[in-house]
Amino acid sequence: MNQSADYITKEKRKALEIELEDLKGPKRKEILANLEYAKSLGDLSENAEYHQTREDQGKLEERIAKIEQILQSSQTISGGGGDVIEVGSKVVVQKEGTKEDKTYMIVGSEEADMVAGKISNRSPFGEALFGKKKGGAVSFKTPNGVVNYKILSVS
């Protein structure tokens, strides 16, 4: 698996496809209806509703283009499941000097969410873990210095 490639999980791909369908259908129609209403109010140069709706339309089209680009350029992965850490792997680690275990999932950068325990394969921690096995140790630099972790399990 190429660490520098863009990856998304099946769940994220499905969520993006649903969002894209909604944006291209009902949301686009809603903005076009709002635009027609705003135009009917008269003078466009001083029409705040018109200018706001045009801005909303621009944001919508930008999001549509972004989702289409992600879906086109990203490889879909399923769970890791092997001995070696890769995108899709769930990893249980223990920070040096603590007794607390933490579980993380290695995901593509588009899905990274530290609060939910999803770490990007391109983050310093994700890069340090990539390719390692259970029982190994990793260390990486943070703004506060070097941090060391022991890998307890990989699934």
Image (cartoon, rainbow, N blue to C red):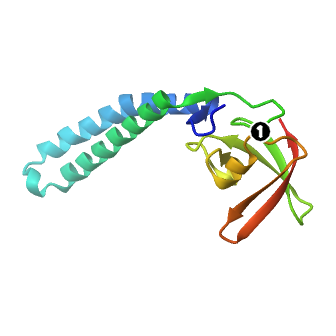
Residue at 55%, 42% in the rendered image: 110
Judge from the rendering whether residue 115 lies leftward or rightward of residue 73; answer left or right.
right
Quarter of the image for the N terminus: give it: top right
Question: The C terminus lies in which quarter of the figure?
Answer: top right
Asked if residue 67 lies left or right of residue 62, the reply is right
Q: Nearer the viewer, residue 1 or 89?
A: 1
For residue 100, what is the image quadrant?
bottom right
Q: Which x, y percent locates residue 32?
A: 25, 36
Q: Residue at x 19, y 56 (%)?
A: 48
Q: How would you rate the neighbour count of disc 1 (Cα within 10 Å): few for under 14, some for 14-19, many for 20 or more?
A: many
Q: Residue furthest left?
A: 43
Q: Is residue 34 left or right of residue 15?
A: left
Query: Which one is nearer the viewer's eye here, 150 or 8?
Result: 150
Examine the rendered structure and indicate whether residue 102 appears above or below residue 89: below
> Is residue 140 left or right of 30 when viewed as pictured?
right
Q: Report which residue position mark 1 lands on.
A: 85
Residue 51 is situated, as x and y percent measured from the top left of the image, at 20, 52
The residue at the point 69 percent across, 27 percent down is: 78
Q: Is residue 14 above or below residue 144?
A: above
